[in-house]
Image: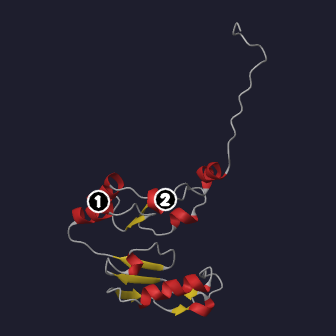
Amino acid sequence: PAKSEDYGRMINEFHANRMKKYLEENHGGKIVIGGECKVSERYIEPTIIDSPKMESQMMNDEIFGPLFPIFGYTDFEKVVEYINSKPKPLALYYFGNKDSKEYQALKTRTSSGALLLNDALLHFANSNLSFGGVGYSGIGVVHGKDGFREMVHMKPITERGTYNGFPF
């Protein structure tokens, strides 16, 4: 994607450098794929990082870039507990079967701006779906009818006749 005119770039060098710092910090994870950064071109290669440390900067900031930390698990109950112990995320991504007890637990026992099954972008790319967070990850939505309603003020108007029925 580095040479593709269709692959997006970071909005500015500051944010490209922010992505680079996440990758260069001692995050303790393993870069599975990607990792190339050309800050002057604002290019950050799509990157999957396996199991970065929870205390790492990338795991404590909202990334808003093409870095994708992933984690395996053996006890899904601990996953749900961990998610619920943190501020509500903008999105949760689950890769697996929609009928699995794990996915059903995410749907019913966690709260997030969006929950995606086997996808990591469609909720934002679909302009008909609301996109927004809950609490710490954002208030309000953009896109679709809900986004329109969020961005306009629906002014209520109440009109009554001049007759005053009160005996004053």
Q: Is residue 60 above or below residue 161?
A: below
Which quadrant does the C terminus fall into?
top right
> How far across and how far down the image is residue 119, in percent?
45, 68
Q: Is residue 53 above or below residue 123?
A: below
Labels 1 and 2 touching (C-beta < 8 A): no
The residue closer to the viewer here, 52 or 167, is 167
Q: Is residue 44 left or right of residue 55?
A: right
> How far across and how far down the image is residue 102, in percent?
28, 61
Per the rendering, the mark at residue 100 is 1
> How far across and how far down the image is residue 116, in percent?
43, 63
Q: Is residue 57 left or right of residue 3?
A: left
Of the numbered discs 1 and 2, the one sitting upstream in the chain is 1
Residue at x-position 35% and y-position 85%: 27
* Residue of label 2: 133
Amino acid type at image mark 1? Ser
**Dot 2: within a 10 Å radius of its alpha carbon, few (fewer than 14), some, or many (20 or more) residues?**
many
Amino acid type at image mark 2? Gly
- Kindly state the secondary structure of the residue where label 1 is placed: loop
Q: Is residue 39 left or right of residue 168?
A: left
Which quadrant does the N terminus fall into?
bottom right
Q: Is residue 168 above or below residue 83?
A: above
